[in-house]
Image (cartoon, rainbow, N blue to C red):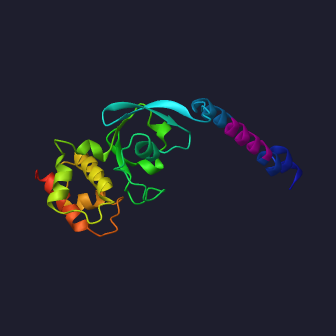
């Protein structure tokens, strides 16, 4: 490099050092801004008492940070419709509705449900049963019945959101539920009948 070029410009080394410092300063400011937006987490240890709203009623329960909603429903509230088939929720057998949306109770922490409305398959039965379990009975949409509660809740949640769904949309919407007996055709028929206003 000539003497004139050295005097007239910035060297590549000094340019890289300067731009690196600017980038580092920008990253630090960005991290500070993000940290200010993140709420401070509350550490919960041991068992704590809380209230869960399940099927329209408030229930006092005792939970640990690791306690799943499925454990609370089955072992504290004696609501055994949701089934412990898969801990990762892949079967859909523990499906419940939380604020109207289908969720697997086996992968949902009970503490995360505070202040939310939880509906289990039991809320769809009783003296005046919902159209979905009635359709499942009419179309014999179960064999062993183990997956049935999860499917019933999933169908109800899906139809609530998609009251005019096509058969193809119903198949796609129930994709997260598995029936090991393979009664899918009857389950789809039952769901289609609900969409069409069947009883």
Image label count? 0
Query: In the displayed structure, does residue 3 sit left or right of residue 129?
Result: right
Query: In the displayed structure, does residue 187 sit left or right of residue 6?
Result: left
Q: Main secondary structure of the magenta part?
A: helix
Q: Position of residue 127 (x, y in %)?
A: 17, 41
Q: Could you tell me which residue is drawn at 31 percent across and 37 percent down? A: 55
Q: Could you tell me which residue is drawn at 40 percent across and 60 percent down? A: 91
Q: Position of residue 198 (x, y in %)?
A: 10, 53
Q: Could you tell me which residue is drawn at 22 percent across and 67 percent down? A: 185
Query: In the displayed structure, does residue 10 sit left or right of residue 94?
Result: right
**Region in magenta:** 17-28
Q: Residue 86's image quarter?
A: bottom left
Q: Position of residue 121 (x, y in %)?
A: 29, 47
Name the quadrant of the N terminus.
Answer: bottom right
Residue 169 covered by magenta stretch? no
Q: Is residue 134 above or below residue 139?
A: above
Residue at the outermost right position: 3
Q: Is residue 9 visible?
A: no
Q: Position of residue 39 (x, y in %)?
A: 57, 30
Q: Is residue 38 visible?
A: yes
Query: In the displayed structure, does residue 193 sit left or right of residue 8?
Result: left
Residue 18 covered by magenta stretch? yes
Q: Nearer the viewer, residue 12 or 167?
A: 167
């Amino acid at each position: 490099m000539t003497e004139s070029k050295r005097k007239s410009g910035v060297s590549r080394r000094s340019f890289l050092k300067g731009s690196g410092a600017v980038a580092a300063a920008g990253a630090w400011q960005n991290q500070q801004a993000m940290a200010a937006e993140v709420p401070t987490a509350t550490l919960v240890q041991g068992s704590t008492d809380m209230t869960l709203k399940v099927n329209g009623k408030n229930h006092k329960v005792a939970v640990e940070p690791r306690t799943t909603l499925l454990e609370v429903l089955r072992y504290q509230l004696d609501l055994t419709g949701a089934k412990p088939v898969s801990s990762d929720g892949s079967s859909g057998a523990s499906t419940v509705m939380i604020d109207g949306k289908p969720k697997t109770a086996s992968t949902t922490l009970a503490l995360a449900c505070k202040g939310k409305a939880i509906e289990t398959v039991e809320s769809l039965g009783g003296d005046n049963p919902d159209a979905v379990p009635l359709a499942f009975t009419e179309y014999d949409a179960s064999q062993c019945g183990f997956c049935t509660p999860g499917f019933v809740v999933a169908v109800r949640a899906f139809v609530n959101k998609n009251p005019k769904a096509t058969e193809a949309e119903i198949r796609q919407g129930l994709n997260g539920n598995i029936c090991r007996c393979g009664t899918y055709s009857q389950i789809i028929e039952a769901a289609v009948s609900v969409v069409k206003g069947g009883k």
